Every structure is written in C-alpha cells, then in structure tokens.
Amino acid sequence: MRKDLVDILCCPICKEELELKITKEEEDVVITGTLTCTKCGEEYQIEDEIPNMLPPNLR
Ligand SMILES: [Zn+2]
C-alpha cells in the first residue's frame, strides 16, 4: 500500500485513525508493517503491500 493511504484508512472496530509502523518499504510503498489503532490499540498487519483490515474475530 502507498504510505499516504494511511490517511484514509481507519480502524474497522472504532473508526479511529491508525498509526503506521513500517518494517520494509520501497519508495512510497509499504511492503510490510503494522497499522495500530490510536484508540483501541488493535494491530493490523501489512504483508506483501496489502493491509489486512479485518477485525480480529474475522481473521
Ligand atoms: Zn480501534
């Protein structure tokens, strides 16, 4: 996913903003990393450029 996508993504549980932590990136694209909700603290993994935005109970 592009880094600026974090601005339009939100937590599927509480709709709050997400904080992006990058493990691996190429130019403006996040390859692997973590999105953490600033409110409930839930983490969403980014793997192979794809953020997994499913709530924990649907994974
Ligand atoms: Zn949340």
Image (cartoon, rainbow, N blue to C red):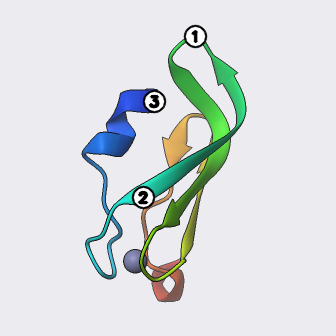
Q: Which residue does the image show at 53% across and 82% down from the upper left?
A: 56
Sequence-wise, which precedes: disc 3 or disc 1? Answer: 3
Q: Is residue 41 above or below residue 7?
A: below
Q: In this rendering, which labeled residue sits more in front, label 2 or label 1?
A: 2
Amino acid found under the numbered disc labelled 2 = Leu
Query: Is disc 1 surrounded by few (<14), some (14 to 19) or many (20+) residues within 10 Å?
Result: few
User: Quadrant of residue 43 in the image?
Assistant: bottom right
Q: Which residue does the image show at 42% across and 78% down from the upper left?
A: 39
Q: Is residue 9 above or below residue 7?
A: below
Q: Which residue bears the numbered disc 3?
A: 3
User: Quadrant of residue 8 in the image?
Assistant: top left
Q: Secondary structure at mark 3?
A: helix
Q: Using the image, tell me which numbered label, if any, was put on residue 18.
A: 2
Question: Quadrant of the image for the C terminus?
Answer: bottom right
Amino acid found under the numbered disc labelled 1 = Glu
Q: Using the numbered discs, state the Cα–Cα distance from disc 3 to disc 2 in whole angstroms.
A: 12 Å
Q: Using the image, tell me which numbered label, if any, was put on residue 50.
A: none
Q: Using the numbered discs, state the Cα–Cα distance from disc 2 to disc 1 in whole angstroms.
A: 21 Å
Give the image location of residue 15, x and y in percent.
25, 72
Give 46 or 40, whichever is nearer the viewer.
40
Amino acid found under the numbered disc labelled 3 = Lys
Give yes or no for contact between labels 2 and 1 (Cβ–Cβ under 8 Å): no
Sequence-wise, which precedes: disc 3 or disc 2? Answer: 3
Q: Quick one: which residue is furthest to the front in this view?
A: 38
Q: Secondary structure at mark 2?
A: strand
Q: Using the image, tell me which numbered label, if any, was put on residue 27.
A: 1
Q: Which residue does the image show at 64% across and 31% down from the upper left?
A: 31
Q: Which residue does the image show at 32% across and 72% down from the upper left?
A: 12
| Ligand 1 contact, mark 1 (Cβ < 8 Å) | no
